[in-house]
């Protein structure tokens, strides 16, 4: 908060002898300039009067505009997601959980230090346990800096050694959140998960491999206009991705919403089946 200091000025009064004519002139009234109020035409005047008498109209108009902008932003993200679907569901490295050959794919953009990601990671485990046809792809976005970038390197090592699922689980269980993660924590967790971080492994990770992993994830995030983690995309593993079979969730999504999206793609959502049949019948 800034503060202003005010100083006081003392004025000295000086008596000056003036001619009578000067005194008379100074006593003459001063003409003040009056700024004319702009005149509205009748139509504008009626609009002005209505708004003044009904100020909530402006609030309602602003709310409608905000909703329109949100819908537009959502539509733009859906279109971007459809264009990027093949890249999303085909990771460079095997950072996959659940059924690798599942017909439904859930993609999560996350950071190990993200507290919101920590809140939903158990839900993802429940979904993979319940849905035997679910394939989950994890894409790390290192939004918390250096330690998260290092974790991305170890992600690649874990994926190459077939230990990714266990390493991912232990990283979240360690609960090093919101900037508390250190490189030494990542190495310790990797050891518990059985991931080798020998000199030769780390040398290869410092090369183009880990850079390619991060580059793909960051490029996708920009194309998808992702503003934070977690962010989820649910779609068929194969075939054409459309508005009807793509589901997008930004932020913490309730598990029932994710399950409903999975059911709609796998054909288990009866409401979706009926709606699709009705839409097909209407086209005939």
Image (cartoon, rainbow, N blue to C red):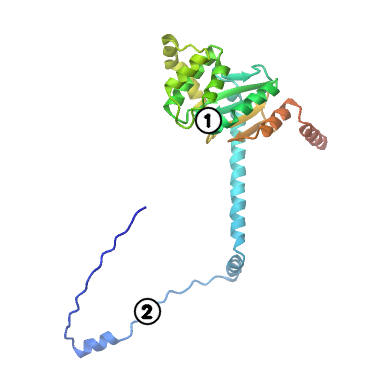
Q: Residues within 10 Å of mark 1 (few under 14, many from 20)?
A: some
Q: Is residue 56 left or right of residue 194?
A: right
N-terminal label among 1 and 2:
2
Relative image position of residue 58 (x, y in whole percent): 59, 59
Dividing the picture into quadrants, the one containing residue 93 is top right
Residue at label 2?
32
Q: Position of residue 2 (x, y in %)?
A: 34, 54
Depth check, front residue: 158 or 270:
158
Q: Would you place residue 260 above or below residue 14 in this image?
A: above
Please tell me which residue is depicted at 70% across the width and 28% down the height of the picture.
262
Query: With 183 as the anchor, is 50 left or right in this view?
Result: right
- Where does the image place residue 108, in percent across and percent down from the top left? 58, 27
Label 1: which secondary element: helix
Q: To which residue does mark 1 refer?
A: 221
The residue positioned 68% from the left and 19% from the top of the image is 102
Circle 1 or circle 2, nearest the eye: 1
Specify the quadrant of the image occupied by residue 101.
top right
Q: Nearer the viewer, residue 208 or 161?
A: 161
- Residue 222 lies, in percent from the top left, at 51, 32
Q: Quadrant of the C terminus?
A: top right
Mark 2: which secondary structure?
Answer: loop
Say whether residue 236 is visible. Answer: no
Examine the image and state in which quarter residue 268 appears.
top right
Tell me the residue at 60%/52% (across/down). Answer: 63
Calculate the distance from the C-alpha at mark 1 to the C-alpha at mark 2: 63 Å
Q: Is residue 186 above or below residue 249?
A: above
């Amino acid at each position: 908060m800034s503060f202003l200091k005010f100083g006081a000025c003392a004025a000295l009064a000086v008596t000056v002898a003036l001619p009578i004519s000067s005194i008379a002139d100074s006593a003459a009234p001063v003409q003040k300039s009056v700024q004319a109020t702009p005149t509205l035409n009748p139509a504008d005047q009626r609009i002005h009067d209505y708004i003044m008498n009904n100020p909530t109209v402006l609030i309602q108009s602003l709310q409608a505009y905000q909703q329109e902008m949100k819908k537009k932003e959502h539509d733009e993200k859906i279109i971007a997601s459809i264009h990027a679907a093949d890249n999303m569901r085909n990771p460079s490295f095997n950072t996959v959980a659940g059924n690798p050959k599942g017909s439904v794919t859930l993609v999560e953009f996350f950071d190990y230090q993200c507290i919101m990601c920590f809140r939903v990671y158990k839900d993802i485990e429940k979904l993979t346990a319940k849905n035997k046809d679910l394939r989950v792809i994890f894409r790390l976005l290192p939004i918390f800096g250096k330690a998260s970038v290092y974790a991305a390197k170890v992600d690649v090592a874990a994926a190459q050694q077939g230990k990714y699922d266990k390493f991912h689980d232990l990283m979240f269980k360690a609960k090093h959140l919101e900037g508390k993660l250190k490189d030494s924590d990542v190495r310790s967790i990797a050891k518990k998960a059985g991931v080798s971080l020998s000199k030769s492994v780390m040398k290869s990770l410092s090369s183009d491999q880990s850079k390619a992993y991060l580059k793909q994830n960051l490029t996708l995030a920009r194309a998808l206009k992702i503003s934070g983690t977690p962010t989820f995309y649910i779609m068929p593993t194969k075939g054409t991705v459309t508005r009807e079979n793509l589901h997008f969730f930004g932020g913490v999504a309730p598990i029932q919403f994710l399950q409903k999206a999975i059911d709609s793609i796998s054909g288990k959502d009866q409401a979706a089946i009926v709606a699709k049949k009705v839409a097909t019948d209407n086209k005939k």
